[in-house]
Each structure stands twice: as C-alpha cells, then as structure tokens.
Image: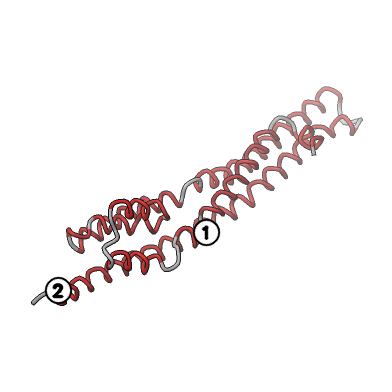
Amino acid sequence: MLEIIRAGGWVMWPILACSVLAMAIVCERWWSLRPKRVIPPHLVAQVWSLYRKNQLDAAALRRLQTSSPLGAVLAAGLANYRYGREVMKEAIEDAGRQATHELERFLNSLGTIASIAPLLGLLGTVLGMIKVFATITSVGVGDPKVLAGGIAEALITTAAGLVVAIPALIFHRYFEARVDELVLKMENEALRFVEIMHSEAPAQASEEGP
C-alpha cells in the first residue's frame, strides 16, 4: 500500500486525506441520522401524556429539546402554545429549519470531497504525463523502464481519485435522501402534535366549565 502511495507521487497524500475525512463523515452521519434517534417512536404520545398530567415544566422542556431533533421541534411548539395555533406552527417551522440544518451537517463537505477527489486524480495524471514527456525529451523512448514512473503516477492517481469519489458521491446522495425523508416525517409528527393540542384544548375547556 505504501509503495502504491509513493508511486502515485505527492498528489496521493491529499487524496488519502480526502478518503479518511470521507470515511469519518460517513460513519458520523450514519450514526446521527438513525431514524430512532431523529424521530423517537411514540414521542408525540409521550409528550401529550406529560402535558395532560401537567408535568411539562421548564426542566422537562429542556430535556425534550435536547433529546432529539423532533423533541427540539416539539419543545419549540410547546413553548409558544399559549400564543395560539399560528404562532405555534411558526415556532415549529423555525425549529424545523434549525433541525434540518443540523441533519445536513457535513453533507456539503462530503459532496465537496466527491467533487475534488477526481480533480486531484486528474492533477496527478497531468503531472505524471508531464514527467513522461520530460523523460522522453531528455532520454528518448528507448528504455521503457525510464517511462514507467511517470505512467504509473498518472494511472495510480486517476484510479485513487475515482476510488474515493465514487463512494463519497453515493453516500452523499443517500444521506441527502435520508434527510429529506426524516424531515418530512418530522414535519408530519409536529403538525399532528399541533392538531392534537388545539383539538383537545376546547374539549378540556368544556369539561372544566359549568
């Protein structure tokens, strides 16, 4: 492996750094974008149960806000519940945008790696071919071994750039699709929560009335 890196020239080092960074981002996003972490099952029902029991104090809201992205969205809505349905929806939408930004963290970096890795490979190819032509100019084409270094550098860097770029692009598209799916589910859960809150409030008021 080290011999291949050396044969590819100095361009192999930034390509190798891109591969390590891409692997770290993929592992981190794979862990962070788990559906159960973003949208815990039955969270809306649990929050509604706490609300009915008057157990949603400031400390409970803080715990809810830090528990998950959906929890942060619901906490924003609960904090503005007394201002009415529309204000509650606006607060949820604002919190949803922040949660979406958090879910998309590092995806731009992964997309950048997918874009620049082939360019680095192309740069290595150009440098390798320059070395080949410089060798041909100085010693001719009589000895193939003299040309092998430049040709190897050109081919190795091209292959290395593609090996890094192709998986990075695949995972970038995959995580983008997962984020879109999670955001849609999160919006549906939040809107369902708003409807539950405001449909039950009149019923509670009539029960408590004369």
Q: Name the mark on residue 71.
A: none
Q: Quadrant of the N terminus?
A: top right
Q: Secondary structure at mark 1?
A: loop
Q: Residue furthest right?
A: 143
Report whether 161 appears left or right of 64: right
Q: Which residue is mark 2?
A: 208
Query: Mark 1 vs mark 2: which is more N-terminal?
Result: 1
Neighbour tally class for label 1: few under 14, some 14-19, many 20 plus, Cα within 10 Å: few
Task: Please state the horizontal and vertical placement of residue 5, each as a whole percent of the image.
Answer: 76, 35
Residue at image position (71%, 30%) is 10
Residue at image position (59%, 41%) is 116
Q: Secondary structure at mark 2?
A: helix
Task: Please state the horizontal and vertical placement of residue 118, each as a whole percent of the image.
Answer: 64, 43
Q: Quadrant of residue 152?
A: top right
Between 94 and 205, the residue placed more toward the observer is 205
Between 36 and 168, the residue placed more toward the observer is 36
Distance of label 1 from label 2 (alpha carbons): 42 Å
Residue at image position (65%, 34%) is 14
**Amino acid type of the residue that numbered disc 2 sits on in the rendered structure:** Glu
Question: In the image, is residue 65 above or below residue 85?
Answer: above
Residue mark closest to the camera, 1 vs 2: 2
Question: In the image, is residue 127 above or below residue 77?
Answer: above
Q: Which residue is mark 1?
A: 34
